[in-house]
Image (cartoon, grey):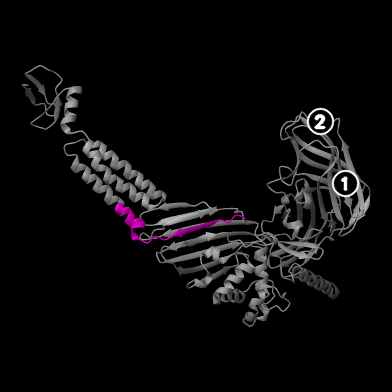
Amino acid sequence: MTLRDRANAFILALLITMIIFMPMAVQSQISEECCEQREFELFLVGEPDDGILTPFYSELNTEEVEVEVTSSIGGEVKIATWDVTWRIEGEYLSETWEFSIPYKLQGAAGFTLNATLEVKIGGDTYEGSISAPEILLTGEGNLEIPVEVAQGDISEGDLVEITLSVQNLVFTSPGEDTGVFFVWGSEEYDASIRVKLPLLEILIKDPSVTGNLVYLPVMIKSGFEDDMWSKSNGIAKVQNIEISESPIVILRDIGVEVTFVWEVPANSDGIIKFEFELIPQPGLIISSNKTHEIVVGEDSGPNDWYPEVEPLRDGGSTIEVDIDTKFKGNSIEKQISIEFDGAMSQWIRWGLDNIGNSTLDSNSWWKNLNSYSDSIKSTEKHNGKVDDSEIRALKNHLIGSRSDLRSFFANGLYLEIESIIGINPIDLGPTEININMGATRAFSSEEMIITIETSYAIEENQRQLLVENFIRPSSEQIWDEVSLNIMFKTNMLTGMGDIYADEMDYTLRRWIIMESISITEADIDTEIEFRIEFVPPSSIIFSPLVSAMISVLALSVALVIGMALTKRRARVPTMITVLVLGALAFTIYWMGLPLQIVLGIVSTSVLLVFPISLVSPTSKTIEKITNKVGGPYVKCPSCGISNQVKSMVRPLRIPCSECNSILRIEN
């Protein structure tokens, strides 16, 4: 090999080595926007004088809105007007828009009418109508009106408005309370107008990589801001496998950016196919996909998925509150676990990573932690993840002041901490707070957990709050799903007393060593005002152990008295009474009903022993009855067994049924 060949070989080997050890890179196809204009429904919601058009099926309520027309008319009656301000400009083609609204007929065989639908798009007005004197409408159905819309342009801020009116309404065979109801606004009665307007654009942006995590941002451009994501169903897939983690949601000037976090599996070949689907309503699936080439290595790619401004908290979050309570008579110990994910998790992660950030909005809650800025290294600030020093800063802030604790929950998490703990935070004893960031400390929407361990003293005969509605009212929906789990336990010498519950079910059980309340509620309606309280008893008599001992003692006394009073009487009625009342008392005891009822039943068993024993038949009476029914009995002197004498012959010899001794009967 010549010197020149060796040089060429060396250069080629060097190039191959550089390619192999090159830092991780991200390559993608050229970003393409979607989507083509298509037909979709604008649903009718809201009251007749304040109606709204919405593309989101999730905005339909469980209860419908209705307008009744009650008499035959010759003039025009306006049913309702619905509108929406369009925030995305574009062109719409000449199409037939289909309007449909359910109706319900009452008190007549049928009806006929003329109906008119006026459609306004910005400054343009279109009208559709039906003349139906020849068509008899009966029962329930849909009134459908087509509207011919000419080609035109819609600008940002234009109002899309529709108005429904009816004329010449005539009922056939009317009776009492005759009328027709036009209904809308619910899933059952989903009135709508089918339109073809520019709705949104989807742009799949280039991904970025941090470690083994790939951030896949999707920009959704629409005039509905973050509602286009939060009120729709969204699905993202990598290599045909759905990403289950909640995405990062950031509101931008042109729409909402949704970033999905995907963990690269081992031995990945670096070529991935990313697919995204958005479903604002059934039947409307807007999809886009893109192929990326990634290589796991050093961090690279654009970092614009990390928000420079404080992220929104209303992008969809679920919360689960677990409360483990121990009641010790004069004090209560609680361990509270608050688990949440989604937009609220993003807000906390971003806030911790931006402690001391001078660009924070003046109303930002995170400005309260600016005094802790010096305790955090400069390398740990604004680095896209939560560090130990930032967690310590928040913990110290919450533990240092009860008012700061209340402020964080009320103004940060939109939770009433007093309703969760059961007492004003100022009255709490020693308190420990832990913050668990979950599976990752990176900026994400992964689940995180805040744990509070505390205790406080209580007063006897004073109502104590166990829990009440703890979601703070807000103009925006912060929490999409709320779950609550409670376990409340006492010791053997402490009773729970009277319990007062409103709009919340619970299970109470009583054992000899404790009493317990358990509550498990999923998907709680945040608008319901629920509340559970209890009143600690003032006497140890109403504790699980003492009340059980008193019950056993009372039943034992009843048995002894019954045995003593029935030496020469029938014992069966007395024993049955004591056993039945005892079983009833212990069933009520276990079910957790008031101990006053339990003690009343066992006391009754003692009192009933006396009259029942006294009215029970004597042994002689029973013997006489027996003799009349089945003949006399004679007792064997050898073994003591009673033998029935079935013959009236005297004298009579019979063998003993036990020892075969011969018994001689003279009389």
Q: Report the side of 337 relative to 24 (left or right).
A: left
The residue beneath circle 1 is 118
Residue type at mark 1: give it.
Glu
- Residue 21 sits above or below residue 235 on the image: below
Q: Secondary structure at mark 2?
A: loop
Q: Quadrant of residue 147?
A: top right
Residue 62: mark: none
Residue 351 coordinates in the image, percent (x, y): 67, 72
Q: Quadrant of residue 166?
A: top right
Task: Tell me the magenta residue range.
Answer: 527-550
- Queried whether the magenta region covers residue 549, the answer comes back as yes
Q: Quadrant of the N terminus?
A: bottom right
Look at 80% across and 71% down and name the residue there: 15
Q: N-terminal of the two: label 1 or label 2?
A: 1
Q: Quadrant of the C terminus?
A: top left
- Queried whether the magenta region covers residue 660, the answer comes back as no
Residue type at mark 2: give it.
Leu
